[in-house]
Amino acid sequence: MGSIRLENVSKSFGEAQVISALDLDIEDGAFVVFVGPSGCGKSTLLRLIAGLEDVSGGRILIDGKDVTTTPPARRRLAMVFQSYALYPHMSVRGNIAFPLKMAGAGREEIERKVKDAARILNLEEYLDRKPRQLSGGQRQRVAIGRAIVREPTAFLFDEPLSNLDAALRVAMRLEITQLHQKLKRTMIYVTHDQVEAMTMADKIVVLNGGRIEQVGSPLELYRNPRNLFVAGFIGSPRMNFIDGAEAKKLGAATIGIRPEHLRLSATEGLWKGRVDVAEHLGSDTFLHIEMDGIGPLTARIGGEFPVRVGDTVHVTPEDGKIHRFDEKGLAL
Amino acid sequence: MARAISTRRKVTFTILGWTIGFLIFFPVLWTVLTSFKTEGTAIATPPQFLFFDWTMENYVAVQNRSNYMRHMSNSIVISVGSTLIGLLVAIPAAWAMAFSPTKRTKDVLLWMLSTKMLPAVGVLVPIYLIFRDWSLLDGLAGLTAVLTLINLPIIVWMLYTYFREIPGEILEAARMDGASLAKEIVYVLTPMAVPGIASTMLLNIILAWNEAFWSLNLTASRAAPLTAFIAAYSSPEGLFWAKLSAASTLAIAPILVLGWFAQRQLVRGLTFGAVK
C-alpha cells in the first residue's frame, strides 16, 4: 500500500509563502509527476512529503495515517536525490546495504537483497567500487538501488536525471518507467522537464507559484488545459497564443493553437505570413512564421517540408483544435 | 623557448623556497646545535656552526635540576585534555551552525572570533582572581579549562568550515534511509568528517602545547607545562644559553615529531575549502 494524501498543506520560509494551502490525492501504485518552472515549489512539496521539511499548516497522510510530525526515517519512504547523495566513504555494496543495516536486517538478508538490487540495476560488477569510481549513470543506479532494497511504501525522485547527459537521460527515463511497472509501487517524481513528465507519468501535477494549476493524465492536460499556464507549459514546441481581433471573433480573450495543429499551404489558408526560421529535423519540420496582423507563430509539420526562409505560406488551424481562454486566462 | 623559461623559473622558485624555508627553520636548528655546546662555545664569536666539541652535559644538567618528565606529562594532559574537551563542545556547535544555520549564525561565529582579538593580558587580572578564589592556581584542571576556552573559537571555526563542505543532501539521504540522529552521526557524518576533526585536533594540540602566557601566569611548579619549564631557565640564572637551548630542545621535540608525522593532515585541514 502506498496512498498519499495532502490536506490543506502549506509551507512558508519566513515571510515567503512557497506552498499555499493545497490538497492532493495520490493513489497506491501511481506514477505521479510534479512539474513546473523552477521556483514553483515542486521540490519543496516533495521534501514536505519526505519529512525533510516541516509543514507550516495542514496534514500529510500516508495510507490513511497522519505522518505530519513523523520524522523522515519513520515514514517508510525512499528518496533519490538530484546529486545522488551517495555515501562517499562506502562502497556500492555499503551504500545499497545501508538502509537495510539501519532497519536491523540480518547479514544473509542484506547480502541477498543487495545482490537482487544489483542484478536488477546491472551493478553486479561494481559492488566493491567507491562512488567516485563510477560514471553519472552508474551513480544514479546506485541511488535507485539504495531506494529499492528497503521496499518502501513510495519512492520520491527529486529531479534525478538532470545531472545526466541527454542520451543517458532518455535511457534512464525508460529504466525508471520499467522499474515502476516491475515494482508496482507509488512513485512521485519531480522535474522541470515537461517531456519527462509526459512520457513517465500516470498523473501529472502542474505547479506554479506554490499552487496546483491542474492535475490529470498527460493526455488530459494536453487536450484540455485548464488555463493559459498549463496550455503553455505542456507540449513541445509551446502552444501558440493569439489575442486581439482574431480571438474576439471566436468569443475569447486569447486563443491557443498547438504547433502540430496548424495546416500549411503555399496557396490558400486562413492566415498568411512569411517564414522567419525553418528547422529541419528530418522527422519534423518546425517553422517560425511571422503572420500578418497576428504576430509570430510556430508550426510543426510531420516529415520534410520544402520551404525556405522568406517564403510566403498560408496557415489554417485544424477543426476543433483551438483552445479558448477568457480574460483571467481560464479555459472556456 | 617557453620550456626553458619555465625550467629557469622552477629552479629560481625552488632555490627561493628552500632559502625561505631554511631561514624560518634556522632559529630552531641553532637552538638544537647550541644545546650540544659548552656554555663557552655557545657565546663564542665568531659563532661555531658545526665543528665544535659536542657534549651532552647541558641535558644532564637540565635533568638534574628539574623534573622534565613531570613537565612533559603536564603538557600532554593540558594540550590533549583541552583539545578533547574543546572538540566535545565544538563538534555539536559546528554541526548546528553548518547544518541548521539561523539568521544569527554568522554573527555568533564573528563574535567568537572577536574574542581572539582581545589581548590576553586584558583579562589576566579577573581570571587570576577567579583562579585564586577558587583555588585553581597551579592546578591542571584550571589551566586545561582556560586553554579549552581560549582555543574553542578556532576549533569551532575550523570544524564549521570543514562541515560546510559536507553536502547536506547526504545527511538527508541517511535520514530517508531510516537512520536516527545518532546513527546518522556515527555511520555517515563522522566517517566523512574524520580528516577535518583529526587536523583540527592536531593543530589545537600544537597551539595548546606552545601556549606560554597563561601557563606562566597561572602555574608555578606543580602544574607547570614545558613552556614554563623553558622559562625557568631564562631569568633566574642569567644567560646560560646552552642550558636554555637544551631545555628548549627538550620542550619542542615531542611536538616537532608529532607535527612532522602529521604535516599532510595539517596542511589539508588548514587549506580545506580553499582548494577543492
Image (cartoon, grey):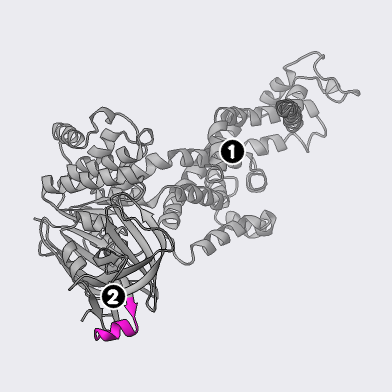
When the figure is inspected, residue B152 is found, relative to residue A249, above or below; the finding is above
Q: Which residue is mark 2?
A: A270
Residue at the extreme front of the image, as rendered: A267
Q: Which mark is residue B206?
A: 1
- Amino acid type shown at disc 2: Leu
When the figure is inspected, residue B148 is found, relative to residue A112, above or below; the finding is below
The foreground one among B167 and A293 is A293
- The part of the image, by quadrant, that contains residue B5 is top right
Q: Residues within 10 Å of mark 1 (few under 14, many from 20)?
A: some
The foreground one among A8 and A68 is A8
Query: Which residue lies at the image location 29% right of the left edge and 65% below the top edge?
Result: A265
Which residues fall within the magenta stretch? A242-253
B43 sits left or right of A238 in the view: right
Mark 1, chain letter?
B
A199 sits left or right of B84 in the view: left
The foreground one among B259 and A150 is A150
- Amino acid type shown at disc 1: Ile
User: Could you confirm whether marks 2 and 1 are on the same chain?
Assistant: no
Query: Which residue lies at the image location 39% right of the left edge and 76% below the top edge?
Result: A292
